[in-house]
Amino acid sequence: MLEVLTRGFRDARQYLQGMRTLTEENLGEALKLIRVSLLEADVEFQIARSFLDRVKEQALGEIVRVTVKHRDRKLQVSPGDHFIKLCHEELVGLMGPEDASLNLGSKAVSSVMMVGLQGSGKTTTAAKLARFLMKSGKRPMLVAADIYRPAAVDQLQTLGRDLNVPVFADGGMSPPDICHKALLEAGTLGCNVAIFDTAGRLTVDEALMEELRRIEELTLPDNVLLVCDSMIGQESVNIARAFNERIRLTGFILTKLDGDARGGAAISIKEATGVPIKFVGMGEGMDRLEEFRPEGLASRILGFGDVVGLVKDFEEVVDEKQAEEDALRMLSGDFSLNDFLGQIKSIKKMGPLQDVMEKLPFFSGAMPGSIKVDDYELVRIESMINSMTPKERKHPDILSDARIGRIAKGSGREEREVRDLLVRFKDMRDLMSAMGGGKLRGRWKGMKGIKKMLGPALFGGTGDPEGGISPENPYGLPEMKKAKPGSRKALEKQRKKSKQARKDRKKAKKK
């Protein structure tokens, strides 16, 4: 995901490693690496140029303290760290602010009008949005207003049955009348949100726009969401502009973002139109629609994962109270293969393993795009554990060569794979026991404990090992304080003092 964008920022960060100051020369080289990456990612030229100009303007001419105080501790902050933090702030400003909320409270039956070209994923996204709204307590109805594409109505009805959501369809009416009648029908069925799945075209044409305009006039939708395929890059920006000129868009939904190696649409579309991104599609499953968080995507682009997004995913698939009880038990040394299997099942619920790994700050910056995580590895592990008896799962130390051979045959795996699994399990058990014996066990307090564990060292070792995560600072970043005007002499004096102290220590050692 977004490999092209990430590569440029990663190369710039590596180039600036070891630099003591940011000069126009070394900053120019770093920005050149980012510029190439932005253009390869299909970010619009003017947007890319203005982004780089803002970063350069912020980075040059500033005095940055290389030692900052954060939570009563001193942290080392390099000029490269400061540059990356500036990039993070500018990326968030480019894609944000965060505005994922929908207008759903002013009427008895609120409405969401889905628009876009054919192939962008409107019908599937309409069903995903219905499921998303159901999780927040809403009662949605899907409205089949695409009467032109073959099997479009059948597809929506099938998705509605899978979600247990009512679908309104009437092939004898025009799309504007279908949507108008659906609003009346929704009230009688006890639904409070109607989602219009409108027709698309291969290109933007006047017939399509006129039909959408009539639906808008007749139903006065509370939300008009343009569904864009993020994989078509800069063309999605042109499509967004064309729609926005003719109808009142309130937000975008970017689909197939998990398969987009470039990311030009995510970077450009809000800046080009002024309309916020509301949701992003991150997979084919009905639960793979996420609220758009510019901070999270900016962090992933910079190669530092998405801690907050990962914790949100975790909270959706794991019971908080049960997770805390399990964690305390495992940290006390009571860790069996049943627990190991439970963790695997939880990870599988969170989505593709590659996506989960990319959100981890420990792995995302160090994983080249060529390295792919095998989701089937979890299936293989699960099959081996399921081939064990309850006693063997509870006490894996009793597994003899004969038992290992039986497990391998039962799961269709090789004996060496079973042995390798046992080695990995024992390593994890030892690690959990060691962690439980230290300070970590006392710091584990529900989901906040998980956030504290995932917060450290996101930006070149400048993160807060003690946590530091808050709504204002979700990634635990220390504040990069600018030196006050006129403090250059004070900084130089401090450097000389430190240098003299090092010399004194060396002399003392020689004596």
Image (cartoon, grey):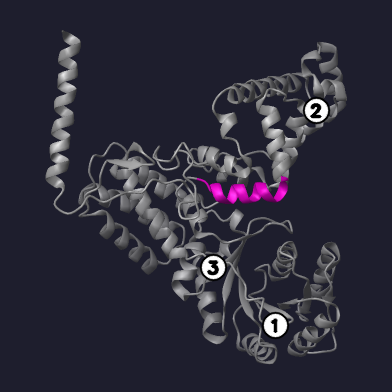
Q: Measuring 16% from the left and 28% from the top, which residue is drawn there?
A: 499
Q: Secondary structure at mark 3?
A: loop
The span picked out in magenta is 305-319
Q: Measuring 48% from the left and 70% from the top, which residue is drawn there?
A: 270
Q: Which residue is mark 2?
A: 384
Q: Which residue is mark 3?
A: 99
Q: Is residue 503 visible?
A: yes
Q: Residues within 10 Å of mark 3 (few under 14, many from 20)?
A: some
Residue type at numbered disc 1: Lys
> Is 309 placed above or below 328 here?
below
Q: Is residue 199 visible?
A: no
First of labels 1, 2 by sequence position: 1
Indicate yes or no whether the magenta region holds residue 69. no
Indicate yes or no whether the magenta region holds residue 308. yes
Q: How far apart are the two marked residues, 3 and 1, measured between alpha carbons?
A: 21 Å
Please state which of residues 300 and 314 is positioned toward the viewer in this rendering. Answer: 314
Q: How far apart are the two marked residues, 2 and 3, measured between alpha carbons?
A: 45 Å
First of labels 2, 3 by sequence position: 3
